[in-house]
Image: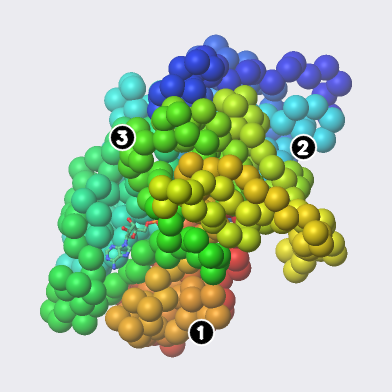
């Protein structure tokens, strides 16, 4: 391994006052000079763990980093797009420190290569210097309905056009992109980046039908009645986990996605103390959104300690820089009302960490006699999300696991109902964008096989998808 390694190139970021008051993207992106300098730090491992072990999509990382070293940016961008359906998005939102960069060999003794920043650089460069269009093969005459326009649906739609199948993507929302457009805040992922990706898809012939909640205006049976040869379900996990806490219906107690979905014009919290309950990316995004909407204080109350938090480390660091405070080892007991009937505080209990659970994270246990109150004008519940099991069970007629996730063959996305495939959060539980893309691509390949050969038995044995559940 190289003895003298140059320091990692720092990502230019928006200044702190702008970060605290606007939803502008924080990371500004590398300059070409920075990208080449950073790429030249890479030792181009022959057995690259970043790609083989760290990246769920097995992106060809050293191969495109070598192209950046040679200043072949367009070629590098084209290569990133062979394994990923949205590299400009994954590069912005993946928790790289736990994925590719966490497996970087250089990172054992030095700072890991800034793989995410390089992936973003070449794709932004390609967008600015004449976008690379998506390829569509000659029409096969086969048609697929995609339910849900998030990353799993988008990844599959891209693949269907690549093979020449017609595809219509239905979404309950008018804006395509799933959580990318209607959940993740703009300071992490600008809406424009999602819209650019959607333009590539529609330019390649993907049809989008917004405002269509399948199950209401049209059923899955309708989709099969002469319209489509296969149905791909990518409806995500949008049902909030709501613990049975007294006072949870008080005014001022809100669900994280409701809080986030308003964007800059959402629920006003100017001058308020906001407390967010939870420890994942959704909690972090909510607290940082509260700061940007003018909260005087934004606190995250989490039942484990910092080292056992599931969210991305870089997001935690940035949240702290922006003024988000953390209360570790506290668990909510009840929401308390003020004289005006709104929430005024959350009664919490201190926790201690016990033995590790099945995922290896230490289990929090209550400390007797440790109850206290945390003042809150607004309390945001970010306890996690699950697929809408009632809809999938009733409407789709597919088998679910105990958590309400759709059971699929993990390699083909086939469900228990012939012709119906599924991927993304509705099969994994709330997870990560890169795994929604991966499972979307695998299911698309499964559907392609089904359309070609019609051999359901070969695709169908149900194997529960591995749950990553780290977001
Ligand atoms: C606040 C927040 C922050 C996150 N931050 C990160 C991050 O930084 N990095 C990361 O990797 N992951 C992050 N995630 C997780 C990531 O967004 C999800 O894992 C990913 O979006 C899942 O993709 P999907 O395609 O399965 O579903 P979704 O993106 O949820 O899309 C599902 C779509 O299906 C539509 N739909 C549902 N039911 C129907 C129906 N009956 N008919 C028609 N349409 C329907 C919905 O309207 C939605 O548009 C975050 C999640 C949240 C909530």
Q: Residue furthest bottom?
A: 457
Q: In percent of the image, x 49 and y 23: which residue is there?
A: 20
Secondary structure state at the residue bearing disc 3:
helix
Q: Residue furthest top?
A: 33
First in residue order: circle 2 vs circle 1: 2
Q: Are marks 1 and 3 in contact (CB under 8 Å)?
A: no
Secondary structure state at the residue bearing disc 1:
loop
According to the image, label 1 marks what residue? 461
Q: In the image, is residue 362 above or below residue 275? A: below
According to the image, label 2 marks what residue? 105
Q: In the image, is residue 381 above or below residue 446? A: above
Q: Are marks 2 and 1 in contact (CB under 8 Å)?
A: no
Residue placed most toward the observer, 154 or 4: 154
| Residue 341 numbered mark, or none | none
- Left or right, 378 with respect to 319, comes to left
First in residue order: circle 2 vs circle 3: 2
Query: In whole angstroms, how far apart are the C-alphas of marks 2 and 3?
Result: 44 Å
State the image coordinates of residue 440 (x, y, percent, origin top left): 42, 60
First in residue order: circle 1 vs circle 3: 3
Query: In whole angstroms, how far apart are the C-alphas of marks 2 and 1?
Result: 37 Å
């Amino acid at each position: 391994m190289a003895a003298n390694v140059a320091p990692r190139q720092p990502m230019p970021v928006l200044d702190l006052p702008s970060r605290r008051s606007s939803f502008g993207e924080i990371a500004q992106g590398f300059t070409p000079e920075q990208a080449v300098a950073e790429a030249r730090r890479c030792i181009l491992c022959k057995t690259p763990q970043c790609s083989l072990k760290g990246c769920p999509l097995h992106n060809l990382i050293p191969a495109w980093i070598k192209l950046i070293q040679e200043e072949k940016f367009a070629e590098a961008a084209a290569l990133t797009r062979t394994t990923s359906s949205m590299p400009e998005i994954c590069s912005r939102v993946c928790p790289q420190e736990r994925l590719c960069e966490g497996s970087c060999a250089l990172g054992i003794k030095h700072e890991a290569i800034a793989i995410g920043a390089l992936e973003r650089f070449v794709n932004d460069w390609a967008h600015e210097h004449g976008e690379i269009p998506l390829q569509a093969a000659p029409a096969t005459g086969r048609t697929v309905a995609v339910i849900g326009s998030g990353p799993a649906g988008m990844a599959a739609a891209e693949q269907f056009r690549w093979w020449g199948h017609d595809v219509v993507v239905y979404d309950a929302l008018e804006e395509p992109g799933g959580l990318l457009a209607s959940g993740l805040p703009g300071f992490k992922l600008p809406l424009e980046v999602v819209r650019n990706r959607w333009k590539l898809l529609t330019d390649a012939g993907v049809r989008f039908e917004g405002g269509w909640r399948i199950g209401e205006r049209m059923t899955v049976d309708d989709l099969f009645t002469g319209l489509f040869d296969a149905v791909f379900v990518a409806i995500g996990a949008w049902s909030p986990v709501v613990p049975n806490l007294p006072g949870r219906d008080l005014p001022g107690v809100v669900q994280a996605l409701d809080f986030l979905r308003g964007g800059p014009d959402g629920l006003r919290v100017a001058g308020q103390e906001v407390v967010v309950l939870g420890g994942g990316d959704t909690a972090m995004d909510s607290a940082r959104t509260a700061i940007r909407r003018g909260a005087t204080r934004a606190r995250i109350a989490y039942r484990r300690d910092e080292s056992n938090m599931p969210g991305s480390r870089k997001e935690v660091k940035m949240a702290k820089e922006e003024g988000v405070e953390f209360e570790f080892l506290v668990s909510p007991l009840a929401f308390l009302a003020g004289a005006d009937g709104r929430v005024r505080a959350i009664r919490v209990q201190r926790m201690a960490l016990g033995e590790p659970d099945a995922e290896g994270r230490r289990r929090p246990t209550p400390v007797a006699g440790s109850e206290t109150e945390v003042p809150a004008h607004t309390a945001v519940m970010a306890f996690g999300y699950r697929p809408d099991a009632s809809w999938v069970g009733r409407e789709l007629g597919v088998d679910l696991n105990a958590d309400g996730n759709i059971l699929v063959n993990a390699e083909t996305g086939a469900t228990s109902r012939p012709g119906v495939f599924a991927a993304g959060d509705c099969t994994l539980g709330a997870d990560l964008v890169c795994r929604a893309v991966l499972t979307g691509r695998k299911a698309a390949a499964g559907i392609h096989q089904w359309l070609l050969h019609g051999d359901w038995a070969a695709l169908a044995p149900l194997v529960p998808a591995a749950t990553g559940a780290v977001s």
